[in-house]
Image (cartoon, rainbow, N blue to C red):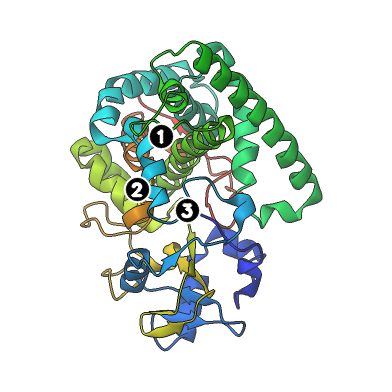
């Protein structure tokens, strides 16, 4: 998700308008209308891609990569092939489909525990009371963070994620908090990595500090960066998907009722919710050599913004794209595509399936309190989502 710091300011949209944060999709449609096709060239040469097929093609184009784009916010997985494949192989095991399915019973149990533990006499915040603790417990268990240390990760992790959005860092107070939290997070990670290097425990961090198949050993800094990427890949998208997704269902009671009556449709519902209001709105690439995007020339060095939120509402790819239909066939780019497909995609999907189905079963209804979105651009998520649970757990 590396992105030039001023990308959003380059767009011919008022991205600071509260209406944009509440619902960016009409803004994207106006941007789409400015171009003769699925690509809009900005005056400074940046290409903004709003079409589904054009984004798909760009994600599969090996002439587009990360290069030196925004190196200060990139993870060690945001490198180009072949180095990317070698590094991804070292960290991909816990996120494989079989590995995640083995976690499903534990995730279901934890979701049930969280729902059973809330005070049903008062409002329940889907974000703070359910989505965040579920995602944190699951990813920490996968990584190998001891249960007694997980609370220390919560605040640092949330601010770390904020730090991946350059727009949020424009506020001096936010920037200072992110810097402090990065130091805290690094301290936690370093301590865990050093302990696992001295005494392996069969978890993800232990696997990282051990020699790889080719005998190579990652530096402590690489291990820390890998763990940070894995934690963020499994935490923030999950929280935002559950929040965005259930908010959308609350606004479409017929769809929520369908999920309640047909829980087997949960996987399809998650895919449609990923399309409808994705937790990641933007992916960026840079032209590594002269190429073209949907026929539009992109000389080497051109920044290419893949506006996933717009591509998912492309009328050329989706019938009635602004309509939520949880039985719609899966077709979205919310988790990326190709070499850089989201590492935690399966884990994100399974957690969302479980929590959204459980919330539907509990008869969760909106309180009527206005919701606010986080002040971020790349990722999209709610600060709070208060509901009342009206049925049994």
Q: Secondary structure at mark 3?
A: loop
Discs 1, 3 touching: Cβ within 8 Å: no
Quadrant of the drawing holding the C terminus: top left
Query: Looking at the image, which residue is at 36% across and 51% down?
Result: 341
**Side of 322 relative to 118 (left or right):** left
**Side of 264 relative to 335 (left or right):** left
**Side of 263 relative to 125 (left or right):** left
Q: Which residue is mark 2?
A: 253
Q: CA distance from mark 2 to mark 1?
A: 11 Å
Q: Which residue is mark 1?
A: 364
- Crowdedness of circle 1 by 10 Å Cα count: few (<14), some, many (20+)? many
Mark 3 or mark 2, which is nearer to you?
A: 3
Observer-nearest of 30 and 94: 94
Residue 165 in sight here? no
Q: Which residue is mark 3?
A: 79
Q: Secondary structure at mark 2?
A: helix
Q: Quadrant of residue 98?
A: top left
Taking the view exactly as shown, the residue that stands out farthest to the front is 215
Query: Looking at the image, which residue is at 52% across and 64% down?
Result: 24
- Crowdedness of circle 3 by 10 Å Cα count: few (<14), some, many (20+)? many
Discs 2, 1 touching: Cβ within 8 Å: no
User: Is 295 drawn above or below residue 142 in the view shown?
Assistant: below
């Amino acid at each position: 998700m590396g992105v030039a710091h001023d990308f959003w300011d380059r767009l011919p949209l008022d991205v600071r308008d509260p209406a944009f944060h509440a619902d960016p999709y009409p803004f994207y449609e106006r941007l789409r209308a400015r171009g003769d096709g699925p690509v809009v060239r900005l005056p400074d040469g940046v290409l903004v891609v709003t079409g589904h097929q054009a984004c798909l093609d760009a994600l599969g184009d090996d002439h587009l990569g990360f290069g030196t784009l925004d190196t200060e916010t990139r993870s060690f997985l945001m490198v180009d092939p072949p180095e990317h494949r070698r590094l991804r192989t070292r960290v991909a095991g816990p996120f494989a489909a079989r590995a995640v399915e083995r976690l499903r019973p534990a995730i279901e149990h934890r979701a049930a525990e969280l729902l059973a533990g809330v005070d049903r006499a008062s409002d329940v915040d889907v974000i703070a009371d359910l989505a965040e603790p579920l995602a944190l417990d699951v990813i920490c268990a996968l990584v190998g963070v001891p249960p007694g240390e997980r609370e220390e990760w919560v605040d640092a992790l949330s601010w770390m994620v904020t730090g991946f959005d350059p727009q949020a860092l424009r506020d001096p107070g936010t920037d200072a908090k992110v810097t402090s939290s990065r130091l805290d997070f690094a301290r936690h990670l370093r301590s865990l990595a050093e302990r696992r290097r001295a005494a392996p425990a069969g978890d993800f961090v232990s696997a990282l500090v051990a020699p790889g198949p080719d005998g190579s050993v990652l530096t402590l800094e690489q291990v820390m960066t890998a763990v940070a990427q894995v934690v963020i890949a499994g935490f923030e998208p999950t929280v935002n998907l559950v929040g965005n997704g259930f908010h959308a269902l609350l606004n479409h009671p017929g769809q929520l009722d369908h999920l309640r009556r047909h829980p087997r449709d949960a996987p399809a519902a998650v895919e449609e919710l990923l399309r409808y209001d994705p937790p990641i709105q933007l992916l960026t690439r840079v032209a590594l050599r002269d190429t073209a995007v949907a026929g539009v020339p992109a000389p080497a060095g051109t920044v290419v913004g893949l506006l996933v939120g717009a591509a998912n509402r492309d009328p050329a790819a989706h019938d009635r794209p602004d309509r939520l239909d949880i039985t719609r066939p899966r077709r979205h780019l919310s988790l990326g595509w190709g070499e850089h497909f989201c590492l935690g995609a399966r884990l994100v999907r399974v957690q969302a399936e479980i929590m959204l189905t459980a919330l539907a079963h509990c008869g969760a209804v909106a309180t009527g309190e206005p919701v606010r979105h986080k002040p971020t651009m790349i990722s999209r998520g709610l600060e709070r989502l208060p509901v009342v649970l009206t049925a049994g757990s």
